[in-house]
Image (cartoon, helix red, strand yellow):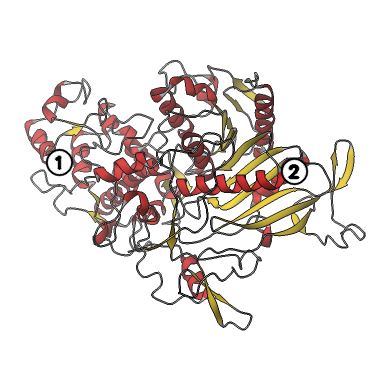
Amino acid sequence: MKAWILAVVTAITLAGCSTPQSHEQPRQQQPFICRTVESGLGQPLVDNQQGIGHPVRDDAGKLAGYSSQCAIKPRIQHFYYTGTGFKPFDIGNGYQSPPADLKTVVVNGTVVPFVVRVEAGTINRFIYTIAMLERAPWNHKLVYWMRGGVGIGHQQGTAMWFSDALNGSEKQLMPKLLAQGYAIANSSGNESGVHYNMRLAEETAAQTKAYFVEKYGKPLYTIGIGGSGGAVQQYMFAQNRPGLLDAGIPVQSYPDMVTQSIPVSDCPLLGQYFRDEVARDPNSPWATWSRQSLVQGMNASDTVKNPFTGKPGTTECINGWRFAMPTVLNPHFRDSKFDKAIAFYGYAPEAFAGVKWTHWNDLEEFYGSDAEGFAPIPLDNVGVQYGLAALVAGKLGADEFLRLNACAGSWKEQRDFVPYKPDSDPFDSANMHRSAACRDPAGTPAQRREGNQGAIRAAFDSGHVFTGKRLGIPMIDLRPYREAELDMHNARQAFSIRARLLAANPGEAKRQVVWFARPDTDLSGQVMQAVSVLDKYLSSGGAPAEFADRCVDSAGTVLASGPQAWAGILDGGKPGACTQAFPIHASPRMVAGESIRGDTFKCRLKPLAKAYTDGTYGPAIRFSDAQKAWLSRIFPQGVCDYNNGL
């Protein structure tokens, strides 16, 4: 069971921001690794001698006490731009004896050294940074920068800027934003690779912005920028904390993280089925990797290298998502960096012994836990007919469809999980419900999993599902198209968001525009164009003509724009120019009948008798009596009726 202590920081109410009614004083997670040393910011301050939190040691390595808050005193450090990155700048002597590689920047017609002032400190246990040009006026506009990744908490994260911690895209974008006079704020608590608690991220951003306003003044507006999990945060904050951001540029977005776990949880189940089929018969049709997309929906390739086999042939399920399910679902699986940090900082061996390393346990404050300390899981595949669309289209035979669904199985309960062994068991099949007799029509099908209804409600009630009911701010959803690479940031996600908006609050859909670019397009240039468009929008109070759906080629030339650019994806009409230039793929659940919204944890079930007559299987499929008997053993409770959600 995780140990908890009450927060000692005072919640800051952000001026100009509305606070959700459910907003409460947060509880703090322990154990929790402070990482200020790794950021070059020194040891955290000792705040107790009771063994709560992170061990703090003096220069001789002797234990000085513990830090529950991971706090450091605020400090200022300067960096200069070299043309390719940033280096520490000696503010005392650097202007008199400037480094040879120091660049300059023109601000309001004046040439000034490209020196950046960065303040760092801790708020809400995470490390914030605030950056702006040293010798140029602030333009009174703020960019709140958010990072991606998939993390399971129990750590502080590291600071931007310090210890050469800017990533490649940040090294490209920071100079451009700073040169235009923007201030850039960030917190390690707004990196989803640190944790995926969106309410904690929201509160951290609110407190960080409140501090910025108090010290530097209220900005004219705040634009969120961030990719992947940094994009998710923008949609979550817009929904849950109106006023925190005034606009956003979500790059490589998802609607949220938790509903991604629905189709992604299917990936290993299906991957293991295909693996077993090929092992049984090397000439199986599933030996052709591209054919697996018929069931998985996501893209697949016969030529892209497979990270498990080292040979050509793989899928997005593997290349994009292979460690996603162990990371969020297997309570024994944790990033190896934790082991290094535990040893480096001298934690007691048993300090992390009770941690359940799952996304749901990380959010135990919302999901709760049972007597053994396991949080309930919302994943459910009862009634899901894998490969249904392929069956209806005549691309999958009836017997193969039945065998697939009889053998797909499901994930075990948390208490029954064993450690993940990727080398010998790449799909983590040891933690699946399987059946040796599933291929026999008279045999026992592999068990399906019933999702916990309380966990499903908690996902929605806690604000971790983007429902589409509220956006409230303009968003330019920007995506480099990487389907050929089988990248996890697949192309359908922006339209999943739009579909949710259209279903829940159609008027809000006009606030989101979708921009696609080729993978070799200058992405930083596209971001800066988006910044310019949003600047016009926020400065004028209305959407400029450029605030429109569009797609561009490798040179950044607009191929098409306007309301028909993405026609055919959500409206079933003739494909627009962008739709044709950038094809999107599906998911296992979409192949099984779910909509592109992707927000159904548990489907409403209908009897097989109804499915036989209501068009579920199309006009051409006629099951024999023996096949119907098999189908009834696979789906004793009925099959999904995605036209009638729960």
In the image, which disc is placed on residue 178? 2
Please tell me which residue lies in front, 124 or 276.
Answer: 124
* Image x and y of residue 321, in percent: 42, 48
Q: Position of residue 180 (x, y in %)?
A: 76, 38
Q: Amino acid at mark 1?
A: Ile
Q: Residue furthest right?
A: 96
Residue at the location (42% across, 26% down)? 499
Vertical position of residue 101 compared to residue 346: above or below? above
Q: In the drawing, does residue 418 fall left or right of residue 124? A: left
Q: Position of residue 505 (x, y in %)?
A: 42, 23
Q: Is residue 49 visible?
A: yes
Helix, strand or loop at label 2? It is: helix
> Residue type at mark 2?
Leu
Quarter of the rendering containing residue 605: top left
Circle 1 SS class = helix
Q: Residue at x 44, y 40 (%)?
A: 256
Q: Is residue 520 above or below residue 314?
A: above
Percent from the top left, x then y, of residue 612? 14, 25
Q: Residue at x 64, y 58 (%)?
A: 121
Q: Identify the residue at image location x=33%, y=38%.
A: 588
- The numbered mark at residue 634 is 1
Which comes before the other along the chain, label 1 or label 2? 2
Residue 568 higher or lower than 278, as above or below: above
Which quadrant is the C terminus positioned in? top left
Q: Residues within 10 Å of mark 2 (few under 14, many from 20)?
A: many
- Residue 444 located left or right of residue 64: left
Q: Nearer the viewer, mark 1 or mark 2?
A: 2
- Which quarter of the picture shows residue 75? bottom right
